[in-house]
Image (cartoon, rainbow, N blue to C red):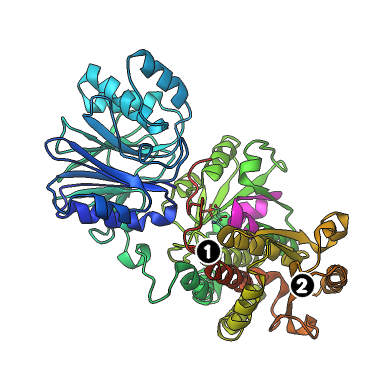
Amino acid sequence: MCGIVGAVGINNPREYAINGLKMLEYRGYDSAGIGFLTDKINIFKDIGSPSRLDEILPTTFNTELIIGHTRWATHGTPSKINSHPHLSCNRKITLVHNGVIDNANELRTFLLSQGYTFYSDTDTEVVVNLLEYFYLSSKDMHTSLKLLEDQLEGSYALAIINEDYPDSLFMLKKGSPLMIGKGKGFNLIASDASPMAKYTNEFIDLEDYDFGYISKNEIRIFDKNNNLVNRKSIIKDAESITHDLKGYPHYMLKEIEEIDEVVKRTISIYHEDNEYQFDNKLLKELKEADHVMFLGCGTSYHASLVGGRILENCNNIPTTEYIASEWAYHPVMPSKKPFAILISQSGETADLIHCLKIIKEKNVPTLLITNTAGSTLSRGCTYTVLLHAGVEVSVASTKAYAAQVALLALLSGALNKNDKMVIDLKATIDVINSIKNNLKKHIEKIAEEIKDNEHVFFLGRSFDYFLSLEASLKLKEISYIHSEAYPGGELKHGPIALISEGLPVIIFITDPNTANSMRSNVEEVKSRGAKVYIVSTKSLSKKGDALVVDDYAYFLSGVAISSIAFYLAYYVSLKKGYNVDKPRNLAKSVTVE
Ligand code: M6R
């Protein structure tokens, strides 16, 4: 959601801050701002993208200390006054914030009673004034930060400038990501490594309750118990963290077209030298479990539906897949000895962080499947298995979904030592490539035909239903068309009432177990006037099917043909003239509940 950058002692602070915020745009934004210290605190902010800052900031200025922010509104509408940085009442402290302060109202009431005035609707302005309140009495930032931390409930990553400390950039973190980039004669902070990759390859992930400061030549981090700590730094190569369109018009298209490579890479990493490469302890704990519970949100939840069904089919382990935000408020354990698999591309999803806290209290072992090494969730889970999908910039998740399904399939294969899974997965690569090379034009044509409809339906059964869910989410997410996904069998139990003349219904028929029943559904919707587009595999295809692909192991449609769903959403969004990579109201990392 919000993005933070900060620097001390960097050569071109303006360039670092603006370009850094542009790198964080993918997290979602509605406004952006920058604050820096000269003889006083200077603040420039406005609604819109970080590019707007290029217009409103002075072309040159000298400063040792700079902070910047992209805001995704939570408290208060998107507006200039609500955007960050926020200033304290005496204008001597400024900060940027990512997260949500749950007790902001109580704290605001307290500060109002102390004579404070508020100009915005944000929880962040409460934080900066509370910090000022503590600082005015303690005259010491270390003490004030600790007092602040003790009072704040909720999540926060904060980057703070105090006029009285012209050499130090202060920080405080709980629940929202914040990283330090170690430089020579300068130091940086940011929400993730991408803004800092041009300047350093050495990073420190801050842990929850860490606070302290960076100066040009020093990094001081204190933990929850107020002890000075030496957090280990990690080296990341720029290639793995920076974003580059590589000639593509949009990240989404680039990322869809990378799916074949991602699947190949996943197989080669997790099945090397003819052997599965998963931690044996992890496999043992999974085998000993009497139930595997999956938790995820959005696309990651859809991947868990596929992974869970594969695990059940191949290994006879009962599974239940939960939407994280639902389970968090009804946290029942499905059995006596469960194992929890959390799936999150970003590793920062607040709903999952909430679930993880509950699961840990119940001493259940956890595995995180993520694309982000060192993420908040990764630090909290017993095991982490990385996706290696490469950075996914487009808000619409595509290659990460295919990687999640591929990885879950490999994990199932590893559990029952079944190499056939690898053969089946390898075979999907040809299907993916043939869609890329031969079917794109046809998908684009379908996109042209459906783009002006207000509603679209997707139907499928079993694995085809899981893919329908993902196809429907993707379409609504970036084309703003209302779409529904239903299991074919549910049609007659209600949704068929909505089928009307000309309604586009996209039907997946790739599973031999359900193909016949799906063909009956085709007739049912056709006879009510629907415009039907059938996606089928060769052996199940019939004359008139819109898109026919080569056969593959039916339970791998999430890998083999998810690109059809992604291309379709992409082309519809493109043709409607929308911002494909940054759809309205959405953020790449959903770091607030
Ligand atoms: O980072 P995560 O995988 O935890 O994110 C979960 C969802 O927010 C995410 O998959 C969302 O549904 C995507 N934007 C869908 O394309």
Q: Residue 423, can we see it?
A: no
Image vertical order of residue 560 relative to residue 169, above or below: below
Name the spot of residue 216 as percent of width and height, x first: 15, 45
Pointer 2: what residue? 531
Up-down: is 494 above or below 131?
below
Mark linked to residue 400: 1
Residue under the point 44% across and 47% down:
1
**Span of residues in magenta:** 283-303
Say left or right for 314 vs 5: right
In the image, the residue with mark 1 has its CB under 8 Å from the nearest atom of ligand 1: yes
In magenta stretch: residue 295: yes
User: Residue 114, how many percent across, how many down?
Assistant: 33, 14
Q: Magenta stretch: residue 375 in it?
A: no
- Crowding around mark 2 (Cα neighbors within 10 Å: few <14, some 14 to 19, many 20+) is many
The answer to whether one can see residue 345 in this image is yes
Q: Nearer the observer, disc 2 or disc 1?
A: 2
Task: Say what amino acid the circle numbered 1 marks.
Answer: Ala
Kindly identify the residue that appears in the image at 46 percent across and 32 percent down.
154
Q: Position of residue 40 (x, y in %)?
A: 15, 35
Q: Quadrant of residue 162?
A: top left
CA–CA distance between discs 2 and 1?
31 Å
Query: Considering the numbered disc 1 on the image, is that residue within a helix, a strand or a loop?
Result: helix
Q: Earlier in the sequence, mark 2 or mark 1?
A: 1
Rendered view: 19 above or below 538: above
Quarter of the rendering occupied by the C terminus: top right
